Image (tube, helix red, strand yellow):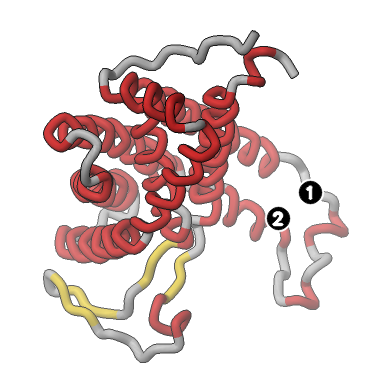
């Protein structure tokens, strides 16, 4: 193993960055599916009523993964600071664009005639149309998601460090939950506004506010529920790095300094 990869902080950052970007990309692709929460949990419809809109609680499947991305953001913030989060955020956006580019290229390929109807007995009469609908998300949706993601991440990292300046090493739950509360408020409404208000569907304001509020409430509930995972991750990381190296990384992260770890001799 090379000296760079022998460094535990380097290996930790690679693992965190890989897991972060993988979750972000998967969330984008599975987000095309809308699921109803109550039937999924075996419950009767809640019949919520907000801003003149009512109905059951429906979410994109991507919301299952975004709370994990929030936790990963806070963990990377804690040990690699503002530059670390910015680096993986822009990396994730670049890879999301790369993935969608090849999805569109795959859609444009002429399908084999036999493949188009191969799943007709299973209720899918046109595989090309199904493939295009699943992987060919509209540009408004993709653009809204990417802009919301980047803006949310930048807000999250800024608030996280402001709370850290005020509290020091105490109350990690406060800086994690506080930064998520503000960043996801912005994220939840930006993505809907670009994708569905400015986009071709042109949602009315009441629907935009209702869906945005429901999505935000879910994200916050998930973020609070996943707080123990943040503490477990921190305990594992500090065990992996050792107390001295973990303290060094956190000190540099708090000072907004992210240096490559010293090579191991």
Q: Is 184 placed left or right of 130 in the picture?
A: left
The reply to whether the C-beta atoms of the residues labelled 1 and 2 are less than 8 Å apart is yes
Res. 97 visible in picture? no
Res. 108 visible in picture? yes
Residue at horizontal 26 percent and vertical 18 percent from the top: 255
Question: What x and y, as percent, mark residue 177?
Answer: 24, 50
Residue ranking furthest to the right:
114
What numbered label is drawn on residue 1? Answer: none
Question: What x and y, as percent, mark residue 108?
Answer: 68, 40
Q: Which residue is under mark 2?
A: 128
Q: Secondary structure at mark 1?
A: loop
Q: Secondary structure at mark 2?
A: helix
Q: Is 45 placed left or right of 87 in the picture?
A: left
Q: Specify the quadrant of the image occupied by residue 98.
A: top right
Give the mark nearer the N terminus: 1 vs 2.
Answer: 1
Residue at horizontal 19 percent and vertical 33 percent from the top: 168
Identify which residue, 41 or 175, lies in the foreground: 175
């Amino acid at each position: 193993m090379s000296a760079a990869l022998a460094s535990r902080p380097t290996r930790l950052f690679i693992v965190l960055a890989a897991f972060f970007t993988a979750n972000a990309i998967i969330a984008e692709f599975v987000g095309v599916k809308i699921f109803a929460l109550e039937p999924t949990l075996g419950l009767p419809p809640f019949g919520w009523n907000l801003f003149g809109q009512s109905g059951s609680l429906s979410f994109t499947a991507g919301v299952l993964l975004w709370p994990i991305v929030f936790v990963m953001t806070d963990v990377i913030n804690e040990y690699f600071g503002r530059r670390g989060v910015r680096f993986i955020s822009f990396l994730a956006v670049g890879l999301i664009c790369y993935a969608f580019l090849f999805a569109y290229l795959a859609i444009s390929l002429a399908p084999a005639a036999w493949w188009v109807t191969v799943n007709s007995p299973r209720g899918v009469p046109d595989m090309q149309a199904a493939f295009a609908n699943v992987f060919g998300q509209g540009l408004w949706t993709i653009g809204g998601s990417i802009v919301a993601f980047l803006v949310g991440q930048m807000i999250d990292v800024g608030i996280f460090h402001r709370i850290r300046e005020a509290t020091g090493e105490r109350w990690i739950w406060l800086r994690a939950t506080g930064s998520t509360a503000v960043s996801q408020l912005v994220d939840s409404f930006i993505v809907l506004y670009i994708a569905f208000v400015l986009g071709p569907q042109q949602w009315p304001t009441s629907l935009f506010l209702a869906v945005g509020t429901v999505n935000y409430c879910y994200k916050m509930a998930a973020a609070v529920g996943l707080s123990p995972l943040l503490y477990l991750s921190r305990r594992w990381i500090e065990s992996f790095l050792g107390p001295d190296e973990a303290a060094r990384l956190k000190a540099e992260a708090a000072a907004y300094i992210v240096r490559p770890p010293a090579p191991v001799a």
